[in-house]
Amino acid sequence: MPPLAAWCETQKDWLVETIEALARLESPSPDKNAVDECGRELEARLTAIGATVERLPQARSGDHLRARFGEGERQVLVLGHFDTVWPLGQLARMPIRRDAGRLHGPGTFDMKAGIAIGMLAVRAILERRVPSPRVGMLWTTDEEVGSRSSRDLIEKEAKASAAVFVLEPSLPGGAVKTARKGCGEFEIVVRGVAAHAGIDIGQGASAIHELARQITAVERLQDPARGISVNVGLVSGGTRANVVAEEARAVVDVRAPSMEDARRIEGVMASLRTAAARTEVSVRGGFERPPLERSPGVVRLYERARDIANALGRPLEEGATGGGSDGNFTAALGVPTLDGLGAVGDGAHALHEHVVIDELPWRAALVAGLIASHA
């Protein structure tokens, strides 16, 4: 076993204890106080392993954390988040527990284990005195709700970095993510003319009926073979059953694998027109996360990671996913980005969320090797 991997293996208990400590501090994205409490624990642990940590205050979301290890002009960025989808009190339903080689609990897989892996990777480099570039770490607090307060910060740090390593969970079996779909959200609003449905229905123009036509038109954008998905997830409208609806609206989630597809979809959504007289349609929204495309820079970074994994005696596959991450932003800037370097496990956003304990140390060794390869 290579020296870095052997050393990381000796730190398995440290890894698990770190994950458990962070997971016990529930950190739902909308609860600033709870997220900040978790952030204080993370800040203390980062400081303890030698980081210079800067807390970046936010008015509504939790405060982001930026950490630095080492010096020099050349930087690589380790990226992730410590907010979760789980509400306060979820621990009562999903207690942290170790069972059959797995560590269960809310936020373990997505992605507090990834944070611990990143921390151990840097510890390995520092304590084993491995040459490396400056390491920047950015741990954010609103990834699960769109990264609105953190996007500018993420992009600024990425532009100053030679590569970005995203410690989101791996794909099943441990594969890293070399492609992610772009994530778009659109709101379609139709306005019509109200009227009594029994007496003057001909005087009205139903916004709901017209919205149904618009939904049918939007559905035609669906193209599973190209990886384009369209989901009308929310629909509302009207006031009473006996009133022709004056207004109706729908919220549409769209995923696209390329910027070309994303721009085409945005053009179609902007060009929607009504078929029924005396109705109007307007569309708001767009692609909040650009696609993470499998660019030559992403491929080169994956191939480097694969070679490091092979040297550790492990295969490393690659794959794509329909979900977005903050790696979408960095890859869209042209910065080589490799996602899914975090824990091996299952159950992101699900009641069976867990990580495989024995897989944790070698993932830390892999990240350490990737960082050192940029020295």
Image (cartoon, rainbow, N blue to C red):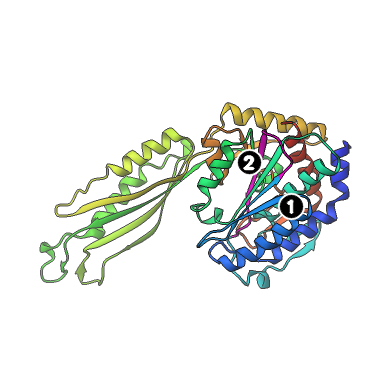
Q: Secondary structure at mark 1?
A: helix
Residue 366 sits in which quadrant? top right
Q: Which three-letter amino acid code belongs to the residue tagged 1? A: Ala
Q: Secondary structure at mark 2?
A: loop
The count of marks equals 2
Q: Left or right: 17 with respect to 161?
A: right
Task: Say which residue appears at 31% left-offset and 46% top-offset.
Answer: 217
Q: Left or right: 33 with respect to 192?
A: right
- Badge 1 crowding class, 10 Å Cα cut-off, few under 14, some 14 to 19, many 20 or more, is many
Q: Which three-letter amino acid code belongs to the residue tagged 2? A: Asp
Residue 270 sits in which quadrant? top left
Work out whether residue 324 can be spotted.
no
Task: Say which residue appears at 78% left-offset and 55% top-offset.
Answer: 48
Q: In front here: 121 or 339?
A: 121
Q: In front here: 355 or 73?
A: 73
In the rendered image, residue 123, in percent from the top left (x then y), is placed at 80, 46
**Which range of residues does the magenta coloring cover?**
69-84
Residue 89 sits in which quadrant? bottom right
What is the quadrant of the N terminus in the image? top right
Task: Say which residue appears at 57% left-offset and 61% top-offset.
Answer: 62
Which numbered marker is on residue 116? Answer: 1
What is the quadrant of the C terminus in the image? top right
Q: CA distance from mark 2 to mark 1?
A: 16 Å
Which mark sits nearer the N-terminus, 2 or 1? 1
Q: In front here: 135 or 121?
A: 135
Work out whether residue 85 can be spotted.
yes
Q: Left or right: 91 with respect to 179?
A: right
Using the image, determine if residue 81 lies above or below residue 300: below
- Badge 2 crowding class, 10 Å Cα cut-off, few under 14, some 14 to 19, many 20 or more, is many
In the rendered image, residue 101, in percent from the top left (x then y), is placed at 81, 56
In the rendered image, residue 242, in percent from the top left (x then y), is placed at 21, 72
The residue indicated by pointer 2 is 339
